[in-house]
Every structure is written in structure tokens, then in C-alpha cells.
Amino acid sequence: MDGFKAYRYYLAIKLHFTTDKFNVFENRGNVRGTREAFNARNDRYIFEKLSNKYPNDKDIIQYFVSNFAYGSDNAIYAGQEAEENYIEWIKRKQSITKVFVDDLSTLLTHIEINKLKHSAIFKFTESEYPILLSLFIGNKITIETLRIIDDFYPFLDSWSQNNSVKYIWDNEFRRIKKLTGFVKYDIIKIEKIFNHFKEEIE
């Protein structure tokens, strides 16, 4: 691992999360990026530093993924916030089932307290966002949970086509979609948990 290789990983992950057409899994991380261009960057020392801290390919990939997942389209790829994003990402990965169960519990409690209908979880009304989106925006449930739910109960495509919020939350919707392949979980176990949740709300 060296700074240039770290930089290429960064480019690949950035393209994956910020564009619709590029998929890092399909492209196998192949990106344009010359050593000359890298050497001309004022921030190349950051990538050199990161390559020393994360010499394992898998670790530095997860580092960049965590910052695009939790950060913004211009990922914070150095500093305290970036480290905190990475630590939180690894923590959630290691306890993804618990994260999912806790988030569903939060969602269920919100529904019961406010006496809401099942449809309010996923559907927009003229005056209200879906409960799932509102809780995500309010940092009450995680982006990983939205990614998982969409695998079993697809909702992201319909959200992305909603003209009233498309331009406001388009980048967030893309971010959630692009986590496909990065958020890993026990499908059989999680599906049982989600089916139980559906029974609870119906």
C-alpha cells in the first residue's frame, strides 16, 4: 500500500457514491488516475499518511466507504471526524443485527406513540414525509437499516421519483442505494426479524 494506491481507492469509492453510472463492484475499482496527477495534488501527503495507517487494502476501502456513507459527497477523508466515521462504521458492521433490531424498535415505538398507520412508514403525503425518512433525517435510525429494509421491502425507487423531495434528498437516496454490497448481514436471520416487524405493525 502506498499513497497513490490509496488515492486510487479513494477515487473509485467517490465515483461509486457520487455518480449513478459507476459501480465499484462492476468496475472492480478501475479508475483513471495517473501517478503524475497524484504527485501534483496538494493533499497527496494525506493519502501517504492514510496508506501507512491502513496498509491493508480492505481496511482503507472501508475507511473511505464509511466517510461517504456518513459524510457527504465531498468526503472528509482526514482528521478526527473521518476517524470517528470509520470507528462507527466498523462498530455497526460488527453488530449489524442489533443495530437493525434497535432501529426497528425505534420505528415501532414511534408508530405506536403517534398512532400511525402502516402506510405512513413508507409513503409521502401532501404535508408529511414517510416516518422512515423523518427518523433517518433526525438521526434516530441508521442508514444501514434503510439499506436493509429496501432489500426486503423496496421503497427507494419510489422515493427517488417523488418530485417534491427528489432534488432535496436525491444525494441521500443515492447514498443509501450505493451501500448495496457494503452492508453485509445474515439474510435468513434478518428476514425473520423484518417479517416479525411487519406482523407487529399490521
Image (cartoon, rainbow, N blue to C red):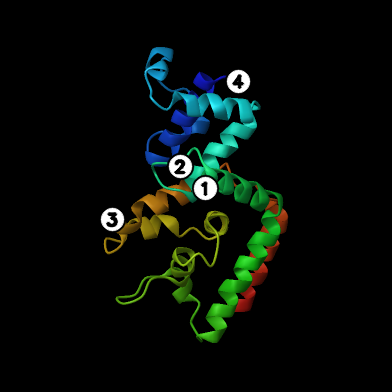
Image depth: mark 3 or mark 2 in front: 2
Name the secondary structure under disc 1: helix
User: Which residue type does callout 2 highlight?
Assistant: Ile
Residue type at tag 4: Met
Pointer 2 residue: 76
In the rendered view, tell whether residue 179 sits above or below residue 120.
above
Q: Which numbered mark, 4 or 1, is in the foreground of this view?
A: 1
The answer for how far apart the CA atoms under marks 3 and 2 are is 23 Å
Give me the disc on residue 167: 3
Residue 26: image x %, image y %?
A: 50, 30
Q: Earlier in the sequence, mark 4 or mark 2?
A: 4
Q: Residues within 10 Å of mark 3 (few under 14, many from 20)?
A: few
Cβ–Cβ under 8 Å for marks 4 and 1: no
Which residue bears the numbered disc 4?
1
Q: Residue at x 50, y 38 (%)?
A: 78
Q: Position of residue 101 (x, y in %)?
A: 67, 65
What amino acid type is highlighted by mark number 3? Tyr
Cα–Cα gap, marks 1 and 2: 7 Å
The answer to the question of whether label 1 and label 2 lie on touching residues, with beta carbons closer than 8 A, is yes
Q: Tell me which amino acid carries mark 1.
A: Glu
Taking the spot 42% from the left edge, 27% from the top edge, the residue there is: 43
- Residue 88 lies, with reference to residue 7, above or below; the image says below
Give the Cα distance between marks 4 and 1: 23 Å
Asked whether 116 or 48 is in front, the reply is 48
- Between discs 3 and 1, the one toward the N terminus: 1
